[in-house]
Image (spheres, helix red, strand yellow):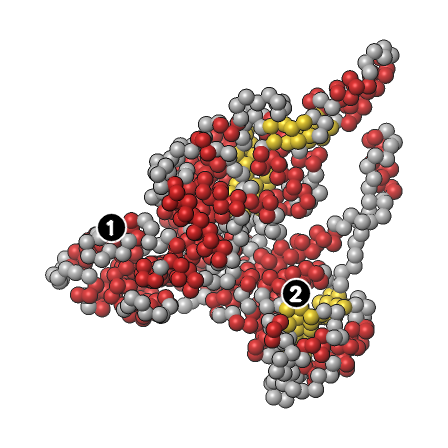
Amino acid sequence: MMTDTVTTPGSGASNGGMLDLLNGFVVELRNAGLPVSLTENLDAMEAVQHIPIEDRDAFKYALGATLIKNHAHWRSFETVFEVYFSLRGPEYKIAEGDGDTDLDELWREMQEAQQQGEGNGQGGMDSMTPEEIAQMLMQALMNGDQGMMRAMAKQAVQRFAGMEPGRPVGGTYYLYRTLRNLDLDNMLEKMMDASREEAPGDLTSLEERLEKEEYEDRIEKFKGEIEAEIRRRLVADRGAEAMAKTLRKPLPEDVEFMHASRDEMVALKKSLYPLTRKLAARLARKRRHGRKGPLDFRNTVRHSLSYGGVPAEPKFKYPRPSKPELIVIADISGSVAAFARFTLMLVYAIQNQFSKVRSFVFIDGIDEVTDYFKATEDIQEAIHRVNTEADVVWVDGHSDYGHAFEVWWNKYGKDVGPKSTVLLLGDARNNYHASQSWVVKEIQQKARHVYWLNPEPKSYWNTGDSIVGEYGTYTDGVFECRNLRQLESFVDLLA
Amino acid sequence: MTTTDATPTTPFDAEPRFESVQEVRDALRDSSYLADEGISGIVYLADRLNKPILVEGPAGTGKTQLAKSVAEMTGAKLIRLQCYEGLDESKALYEWNYKKQLLRIQTERGGDEGNEDWTDIKDDIFSDEFLLTRPLLEAITADEPVVLLIDEVDRVEVETEALLLEILSDYQVSIPELGTIVAKQIPLVFLTSNNTRELSEALKRRCLYLHVDYPQLEREKEIVLAKTPGITDNLADQVARIVRSIRQLDLKKSPSVSETLDWARTLMLLNIETIDEQIAKETLNILLKYQTDIAKAAKELSVDD
């Protein structure tokens, strides 16, 4: 709409190049699973014409604001951005020989300052002893100087990472090597000691805590610089596309429960809370707003008064469907434990959407854990108690669905009523024990619904000792729940 | 009010409000809103691209304040539409003044002259005079510059969001009886959302997206300094650091910027120069609003390690 008014310096001749560049970037984003529509692409194109191209941060924000509309996607966007544009922009060149940059300059200044009293020779980090390096790094960190830290990171990677062109190892290997040589854990201690000395009196524990957090924060930033440096070098070696592929990470909602790494688990937990809030709001709304209720006569007449007695605006009663009662029976043996935990967390986070929630966990024995969740507001703590205190082992601690179900039915079967919805969670890998699937059949006859949630990919069902098919025939549906997205859409259907 | 047939120059050709990102940032600072690079950059882009900004982020990080400050710094009128469940067309866009229309018809009958026929009356009662403008219509028909704030847009139902689409992309409102009303000037539009639900793709696509998070340590300190007159640099630094420390805990509700400011003001009123554990613990209830959170933070802050 405003193409005629756009004349920013540098946009004329390089427009074609820019177009290709941005298109390539959008393709990368889409490859990383981020939804970018055509109009958003056009917006980005227009946006970058209004900002100075040399300003890398502004460029990034312009692209981010136009292309990414969900904060959870920001990290993925950043990764793609860093990889794709890592070699573009003067300050990010890897200086080999003549290509002098500001960072190298800064590095020399730092060295000079360092060598005032020592009189060592000039050069890169290669000519320094580890003690000198540690000393210098500590200074940079204590001053909290961004530029110095970046210069340090660059030199450290050059010296310690031992990167060889064409070697097929991932960035984490180089990162590990660099960090091992820098010994950052001890660095924190040393810095704390130094600031204890500097302080006039003793540090109170509060001050100590604050200092420590400040230094931890700086060390984290420094690690980030090192990572960025390694990434730049890798991209220079292998090309942006290859790197983008290896660095591509699934979005939090697409991470599989059964194969999540520790970092991914943390990210998952973080994204669970906002998700439950959204889910609860949506369910509450859904309950209130199906406008299919019968005519509310009184209300209609009351409103007709403002139209001179003509019932121009019919009013309807809102239907208020009753909340379901939920019974969750979860397998918490090794492989599916993470899945069970997440489902329990999710269910309890939105428990006021149900009239009652009861939960049971089993491996080969079964135990009720409802009280753990009642006792505390803190779901994490309750989950922790489920893992440590629940009495779920009967013989050998290998999943035995059959026995667990049978015991459950004898003990709690009478509590299943026409309002109950029963969720069975697990991969149904029964270690070739008896299935006792009649229990599920009984439940189905008494309960409103029975659903089975399986964290395994569909293609693995009914292979080996998995008997999900046998149980599944007696349920109202078996759902694949490999990630948060699938779990969320199931719960949506449930309430 | 202008209708489609009489628009020689479109308002899209209007002069941009700002020259550079830095100008936005400085101007915001003058109206005591400390923006970071991202915030000022996106405000600048929104002006250049004539696009609304969708501001998301945790409660109390200054989303609404941003719109107010932008209004203040551009000298524009702030028109605010507070969203809530059940918001509809007649509250957001426009409404016909039924009572006045009815009165008009009845006066006609009572006048007993009978020389005006039905078509005249019909044309008459569906004219500007009988139109009650609501915030959205008001924002685009105003003559002076306007900042439109659509607050907590995530509270309306998905279907109601559709009401906003026409105005957000084309800055116009279609009224069946009157035709299309086109904006006289392009307002700067801010939509805020607390992210209690996913907004529709259609809405997001039309906006620039800005996520406002809790500020970094340095910026928070600056905010405290700017907003709490008379506070010492040292105390502001301590406040910012302790708040950062508390935000790292796993809490139900982390302290927001406004709560940080409340806390700083309280400390000022109590004439406190430096915060020690005792004071921190005693005043925690200003930062945190849940008993469990307060207990947790008090425990964490007093651990000796």
Tell me where residue A355 appears, x and y as whole percent: 75, 63
Q: Nearer the viewer, mark 2 or mark 1?
A: 1
Is residue A137 toward the left or the right of residue B228 in the image? Answer: left
The kind of residue tagged 2 is Val
The kind of secondary structure element at disc 1 is: helix
Of residues B26 and A161, the one nearer the viewer is: A161
Q: In this rendering, is residue A172 above or below A61?
A: below
The reply to whether the C-beta atoms of the residues labelled 2 and 1 are less than 8 Å apart is no
Specify the quadrant that holds the C terminus of chain B: bottom left
Report whether mark 2 lies on the same chain as mark 1.
yes
Q: Mark 1 Cα within 10 Å, few/some/many (few <14, many 20+)?
A: few
Picture disc at residue A102: 1
Q: Residue at x 32, y 49 (%)?
A: A89
Q: Mark 2 sits on what residue?
A: A347
Instruction: Give the position of the N terminus of chain B as an image quadrant.
Output: top right
Q: CA distance from mark 2 to mark 1?
A: 54 Å
